[in-house]
Image (cartoon, helix red, strand yellow):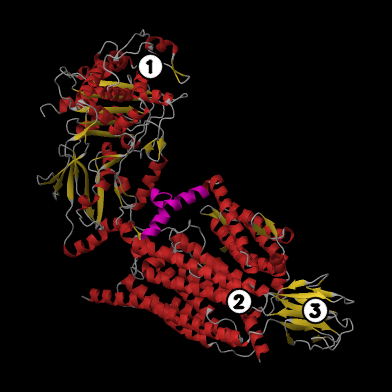
Amino acid sequence: MRIAWRGAELKLLLPILLLVPFGFVVTNIALSGALETGDLTMAVGYVGLIALAHVVLVASGHRGDQLVLPAVGVMGGIGIIMLNRLPQDLAGTRAFGLELGMASTQLLWFAVGIVAMLAIAVGLRDDGILRHYKYSWAAVGIALLAATMLFGYEVNGARLWIDLGAISIQPGELLKIVLVIFIAGYLAETRTLLTSASMRIGFLSVPPLPYFLPMLALFGVVMLIVVRLNDLGTALLFFGIFLTMLFVATGRRSYVLIGLILFVAGFYVAYQLFGHVHARVDVWIDPFADPLGAGFQPVRALYALGRGGLFGEGLGQGLVTLGGSLTIPFVHTDFIFTAIAEELGLLGAFALLGFAAVLVFRGLRIAALARDDFGALLAVGLTASLGLQTLIIIGGNTKLIPLTGITLPFVSYGGSSVVASFIMIGLLLAISHRSQSAEETSGS
Amino acid sequence: MTADIVRVLLLLAQLGFVALLYIVLMRFAGSLLRDLRSAEEAQITSRSGIGRLSVLESPADEPPNGSTIALGPINSIGRNVNNTIFVEDDFVSANHAMLTFRGRSWFVEDQGSTNGTYVNGHRIERAVALSFGDELTVGRVRMRLDR
Amino acid sequence: MIATNIRRLGLYLMLAFAVVSASGVWWQVIEADSLATRTDNPEVIAARRSLLRGTIFDASGQVLASSEVIDGLSRRSYFDPAFTHVLGYSSLRFGTTGLERAFEDILVGQTDPNPIRDLVSDVLDRQPQPRDLTLTIDKRLQDFAAAQLGSDAGAVVAIDPRTGAVLALVSAPTFDATPISGDPDGAQGAMDALRNDPAEPLLSRARQGLYVPGSILKVFTAAAALDAGVTTPDTTFENQPREEREGFVVDGFAIREHDLGGIEPALWPLSPALQVSSNIYFAHVGLELGQETFLEYARRFGFCAPMRIGPPDRGLSVGASFVTEEVDGDCGPFRDNVELASASFGQGRTAVTPVQMAMLAAAIAGDGVAPNPYVVKDVRAHAADGSLSHEVLETLGSGGGTRVVGSAAAAATRQAMVDAVNGELGRLYAGQADVTLYGIGDARSAGKTGTAELGGEQAPHSWFIGFAPAEDEATPRIAIAVLLERGGSGSAGAAPIAGRVMAEWLRLSEGS
């Protein structure tokens, strides 16, 4: 391994080293009313982790994309500043003899995630293990789902968690990655068949069923179970990822159109059949109809957005609690974007969206430069996952679409989400590294 | 009085924080633009490259193991030295297969070889479209189609 | 190829980012002001948690609600649960309802429609000046009416037909609003208990409850037909005596009479028909009126749309009442003449609020003019010691009203209602509403009972509407509607309550 200087990455990371401690100081002044910096251990810990990731990538001679890590670093930084500002007893760990508040726990998960990311980015030199064992990955996915069905417990009516004693994990987050790997493998293999041959039903051309059926079947099973687990956000996300990858693999808008029609039809059926879906849509259409009952959470979130306005109320100065209870329930997971938009204003919210857009842009660039179809589709799937997840939860916060309980990648509190998101970044970096290396060997 | 000073400083710090976010974002934008420009240049210089074959396994080392072969639109593969891609292997026929770029895709067609042509381990009967990353096997020589 | 598709995907995703950004602009810039002015906004509540609210007095100066600031926190106390459904509550956790909501800005003394902006300017210069309110309701009558209902679910609404002043507005069961206005955690517990109470104490039955009216709606049918000129007080329907026994066939559907209790059917004109509450007679009247005209008069009387007790921008909301099936908050068309005939005697798809029924009684009592109802008499300066200030800042209640039927039609209907309580036949039904039974020797009452059949095994709703004094030459001082949910017949349940409440008011208002 020889060292590869990553100048662009370093240049973008330097201001982050300043940004996160600065955010902590501002928060502390606002909360205490005194000109003191407060405890900066956590901020230093965070920038240390990001710096460490950079050093490891440099030392291992990694040639992967240089904008991805900084973009993630800013998003995670805004997240950790916000989580540090919220009441620390909202979540936390009491395990392994440790007693950690919410932000410290999140930092711990960042450490785990970054290690996982580096292991994959540096260690995954051959994607054969991903590509060739796609049915094994599908089996792993099904097993994850089955485990959730059997051993999962409910939080807020959705059965998503598995208790492992000291910690709880959300298998859906890992399932997402496994599913993307499977679909990428399958589409890379059958892509040309799906594109060249096709049947026509009416004015729509549909893929030849024998090639398409296995994936459709697996996908149907997954969707069915996710809906059974009452996790609409994940269902929407999976469907979006699937359609995106199908579109990129085949270039057929008609497939996407069929998919969307199916989704709308399925959603309408669910709306008619399931009370909880019906209730959620009603709350979405008019949360103010029952501002103290079903609409409590979204209405409070909209108020917070309104309070934020263009410039925000300032870090540490938002109305997070009122009379001892949170103004927005689940502000640290579902509504972290709203909290940021309240304190940093529309300008801050736009900046956050901007960094997410940069991440998506770079992910797609990695896909376009990938050495083979599998790598390209995998990168598209991972990028779509991160991008759509961001869009779905922020859109839910602003009442653009019904609210769902998925996380904002790198920003929301939650170990499973953070680790899974970093694994995805690790995979993107690995794909990017392979294509960059190939470029150089053939170019010279 | 001091409370007022703190408040003013705090306001400045708040605005400073958001300003810093935008400075970082601008730097990102700068990097993105630079990459786009260099990508365009790279595209102009390598417009002719429609694909290449990476040699994964070649018992006689002709083509050499680990080498890459730049491809033109029409490539013939075989043991005859007049082929575009000359393959030294006893299991390869003189005129073994054709690898052609038509429209937007790569196709491979067997030329009536004795031992057949394989794509991803499956023997092909007719012209077959290839994806980047697919493995092509003639005789004992394994090659991968890359971008 | 894939690269092209990825580029297209990038375009679509950036488009999605733009749309999501636009939704942020919507809430954070465009809608920010209107969000900031909503009273259930927690910041509005937080901003007001330390502000003193004005005191609310009854018509005679008794304190109904008052606030005090303890440790920088404003605490609201309510002193009479009988008023809860009028005053509403002001809660840190649940926002404001009722008059507390309608008069929010006046009670806390703010004038800027944006309370936050207003607060900023106010906090810098001076504390806002709270204002007090005086109601038109006399605590003694309100408590008396509430005691009459006791623990039964129901409502009593009494209005002065001359002015529109609300004299009583009782919904039962009720609840104590003080815990809900207290500390947020306790408030949550109190609210949860109320929400889970099967008796539904949170429902303001008088204003928001919708009930089948039954025979009390015949008063409307009679007045409308007389005013439209399709009937006179002497109109009879020749087949009516036979139809009382055999049924009145409308479009192939036989409408049947209720149990007349042994009274022999005869060729009745308006007065005896109303006295015995003949469904057949009023079905004929309704058919004479026709579907269009029936609906037109219903709208004139205030049906088919929500109404307010008080000025349009600052009133207690009252749900819409319906004479046909509801369509988008309005009365839909009649499906057929069977429905029209049924609606004419208060069945079919009719559904009304007790307030609307009191307004019907008030319109007849008021010579055909429906008064503009109001419940807040005036706004006064706030006295620090909690006493009633003499400094009246604003007087509400414009008087006046809307003419809904002509004098002649109102007078004829009024006479039939007097007979319905005092007449030979009527006394058997509505006699218990006679105020002379309750110690008022020199006055008569007018009215009509209603027994709203709900179908199945359910006990009917018990209704009475009426007014007093109603003898010739007298000007009625109180119009009333009494509802007892599943209270059985109107004559046994609602009529005596109405009689007692009217008698009590005639006593209390003696000399006014």
Q: Which residue is mark 2?
A: A368
Q: Which residue is mark 1?
A: C280
Determine the image quadrant of residue C487: top left
Image vertical order of residue A161 relative to residue B104, above or below: above
Whether residue A112 is visible: no
Tell me which amino acid carries mark 3: Met
Which residue appears at 81% of the width and 78% of the height? B137
In terms of secondary structure, where does tag 3 sit?
A: strand
Q: Residue A152 in the image: state x and y as whole percent.
A: 60, 56
Which residue appears at 54% of the width and 54% of the height? A158
Q: Chain of mark 3?
A: B
Q: Chain of mark 1?
A: C
A316 lies left or right of C246? left
Mark 3 closeness class: few <14, some 14–19, many ≥20 residues within 10 Å:
many
Same chain assignment for discs 2 and 1: no
A342 lies left or right of A72? left
Q: Chain of mark 2?
A: A
Which residue appears at 43% of the width and 24% of the height? C338
Residue A85 lies in the magenta stretch: no
Q: Quadrant of the C terminus of chain A?
A: bottom right
Residue A292 lies in the magenta stretch: yes
Image vertical order of residue C217 relative to residue C10, above or below: above
Same chain assignment for discs 1 and 3: no
Q: Residue A110 in the image: state x and y as whole percent.
A: 53, 73
Tell me which amino acid carries mark 1: Ile
Q: Main secondary structure of the magenta part?
A: helix
Mark 1 closeness class: few <14, some 14–19, many ≥20 residues within 10 Å:
many
Question: Which region of the structure is painted magenta?
Answer: A277-303
Closest to the camera, between mark 2 and mark 3, is 3
Tell me which amino acid carries mark 2: Ala
Same chain assignment for discs 2 and 3: no
